[in-house]
Image (cartoon, rainbow, N blue to C red):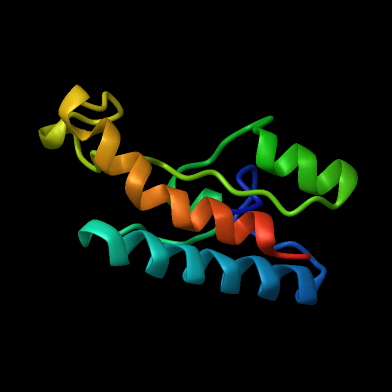
Amino acid sequence: MYPWGYTDQPFAIVDDRSRMANLARQMKELIGGVHGKVYKPQQASQLYPTAGDATDWTYGEYGIPSFTIELRPASPGEGGFILPGSQIRATWEENQPAAFEFIRQKL
């Protein structure tokens, strides 16, 4: 997820918005390529509204591209936000290439 979380309006700088959305899609593909888990790239407020989150602050205050990755499991039936110990390594394995791609970018 990328800014904004506090509003459903996209941020005004179209180039920034395009770069973050494209990178989010690339990261999704990298994650899915490891164990087949599907993550959804989107503006944070499309999942749920937030107030005062780090991605909004770092981008809004400093112009730093920022992302939040909601880790698996995706639904309450799968454990909600409580990651079972058996999924920790797999979650790291699938998120590592996406994190490295984010670091490589010169946004």
Judge whether 32 appears above or below 71 on screen.
below
* Coordinates of residue 28 in the picture (x, y in percent): 41, 64
For the point 13% across and 36% down, which residue is it?
78
For the point 28% across and 31% down, which residue is it?
88
Judge whether 103 appears above or below 87 on screen.
below
Q: Quadrant of residue 77?
A: top left
Q: How many marks?
A: 0
* Coordinates of residue 41 in the picture (x, y in percent): 46, 62
Q: Is residue 76 visible?
A: yes
On the picture, is 82 further left or further right than 25?
A: left
On the picture, is 40 further left or further right than 49?
A: left
For the point 26% across and 27% down, which residue is it?
83
- Farthest-out residue, right: 62
* Coordinates of residue 40 in the picture (x, y in percent): 38, 60
On the picture, is 50 further left or further right than 25?
A: right
Q: Tell me the quadrant of the picture where the C terminus can be found.
A: bottom right
Q: Is residue 72 visible?
A: no
On the picture, is 36 further left or further right than 28?
A: left
Q: Toward the viewer: 7 or 83? A: 83
Q: Toward the viewer: 86 or 5? A: 86
* Coordinates of residue 89 in the picture (x, y in percent): 28, 35
Judge whether 66 appears above or below 35 on screen.
above
For the point 45% across and 49% down, which residue is it?
96
